[in-house]
Image: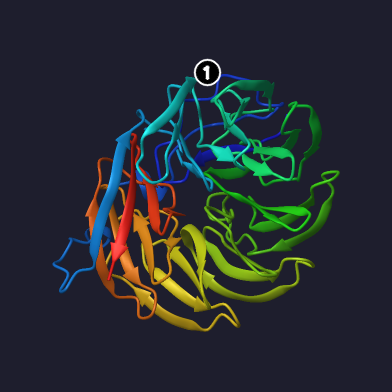
């Protein structure tokens, strides 16, 4: 039996203890020492201060889709729809301009992650590894099973639904029929964060981050590894000190892919070959985003940092939101937005790192804000989905 354990990321409380299939793995849930121990005075969340000449941010619409506490909920945005889900299994299709409900269905099981869609097929995954495929009209297409529970939204596209389970297996299903096409497994260290680590399509590969600090490109046609590159290498004497998992969102622009790791580094690679282009020491609290010529990241102190995509030179840093438990960044045309554990969405000017606006929503935010119709779409842990439109 494998010794792999999974511990909470600190970004959100972990789901309930696993009771389903674990593919021969022992999965133990605990909190990170940093997240569960008493907060020192120097690590108290920064107080919110007045913003001079704040950016005008219009809340175009907000709807409540159901509680999402203890899971990593994230909506899927397509050209003609927003798909959002709740922990109890409810799945919604919303109009992207108005938030009006088009339809709702209820999956046969409680959900463990957000939604994936390419506009034709919609996929969600359950807390015991169930995977459900639906048509864009809400009609059920198929139901399958993966080796363990899922905390990362399925990735849908290229005729596939790709699901990452907490045992670090990546399973690909035919999007229309649910037939399993392949399963990819990689050796992992004995201890791993229980955190949502997203995947991205790049050409004919899917790129995913793994415990131990590695980024891997997997071929879409057969599930073979195309390249395997280190974002960072584990350090330290204990298993906790050696945690170096790639976490959060992955940035992709042209032929460049970037990621960040816990207690490790932020790094960019050639997406075709996996050759490292640059890396900088940084312990990540969340994932990364690309905004024009810059890579945006969030470190363990909730500092937002900007690096040059071209060579990794530091551009600016924003320390105003220290220890507020920030989400992965969501990049707009002129601003980057991050959510925090108190339900605020903060907007930072990407040209200089200055805090320029904030909006208060109902509930903790752990998923990255997503671009939608010229604005940013956010889902909170209490189930509020809101479209924010910055102006000015």
Task: Please identify the residue farthest to the top as the structure is shown.
Answer: 108
Q: Residues within 10 Å of mark 1 (few under 14, many from 20)?
A: some
Q: How many marks?
A: 1
Front in this rendered view, residue 240 or 273: 273
- Name above or below for residue 45 compared with residue 71: below
**In terms of secondary structure, where does tag 1 sit?**
loop
Residue 182 in the image, given as x and y percentages of width and height: 81, 36
Give the side of residue 59 with respect to residue 171, left or right: left
**Which residue is labeled 1 in the image?**
109
Residue 319 in the image, given as x and y percentages of width and height: 31, 71
Front in this rendered view, residue 153 or 234: 153
Front in this rendered view, residue 13 or 335: 335
- Name above or below for residue 24 compared with residue 308: above
| Display colour scheme | rainbow
* Residue pictured at 41% horizontal, 61% vertical: 300
Locate residue 285: give its quadrant. Answer: bottom left
């Amino acid at each position: 039996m494998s010794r792999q354990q999974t511990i909470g990321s600190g970004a959100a409380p972990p789901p309930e203890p696993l009771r389903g299939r674990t593919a021969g793995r022992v999965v133990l849930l605990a909190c990170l020492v940093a997240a569960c121990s008493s907060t020192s005075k120097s690590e108290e969340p920064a107080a919110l201060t007045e913003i001079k000449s704040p950016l005008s941010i219009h809340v175009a619409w907000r709807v409540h889709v159901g509680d999402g506490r203890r899971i990593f909920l994230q909506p899927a945005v397509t050209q003609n729809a927003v798909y959002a889900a709740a922990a109890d299994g409810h799945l919604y299709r919303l109009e992207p301009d108005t938030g009006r409900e088009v339809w709702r269905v209820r999956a046969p099981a409680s959900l463990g992650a957000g939604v994936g869609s390419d506009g034709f097929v919609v996929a969600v995954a359950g807390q015991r590894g169930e995977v459900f495929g639906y048509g864009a009209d809400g009609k059920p297409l198929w139901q399958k099973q993966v080796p363990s529970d899922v905390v990362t939204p399925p990735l849908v596209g290229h005729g596939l639904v790709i699901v990452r389970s907490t045992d670090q297996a990546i399973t690909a299903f035919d999007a229309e029929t649910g037939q399993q096409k392949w399963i990819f497994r990689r050796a992992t260290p004995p201890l791993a964060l229980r955190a949502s680590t997203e995947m991205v399509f790049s050409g004919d590969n899917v790129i995913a981050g793994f415990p131990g600090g590695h980024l891997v490109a997997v071929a879409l046609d057969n599930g073979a590894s195309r390249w395997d590159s280190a974002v960072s290498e584990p350090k330290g004497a204990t298993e906790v000190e050696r945690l170096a998992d790639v976490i959060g969102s992955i940035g992709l622009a042209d032929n460049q892919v970037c990621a960040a790791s816990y207690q490790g580094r932020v790094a960019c690679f050639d997406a075709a070959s996996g050759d490292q282009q640059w890396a900088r020491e940084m312990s990540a609290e969340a994932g990364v985003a690309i905004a024009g010529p810059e890579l945006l990241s969030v470190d363990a102190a909730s500092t937002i940092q900007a690096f040059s995509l071209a060579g990794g030179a530091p551009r600016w840093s924003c320390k105003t939101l220290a220890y507020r438990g920030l989400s992965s960044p969501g990049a707009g045309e002129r601003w980057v937005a991050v959510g925090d554990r108190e339900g605020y969405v903060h907007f930072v000017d990407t040209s200089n790192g200055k805090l320029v606006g904030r909006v208060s929503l109902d509930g903790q935010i752990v998923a990255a804000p997503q671009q939608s119709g010229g604005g940013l779409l956010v889902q909170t842990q209490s189930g509020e989905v809101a479209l924010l439109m910055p102006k000015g």
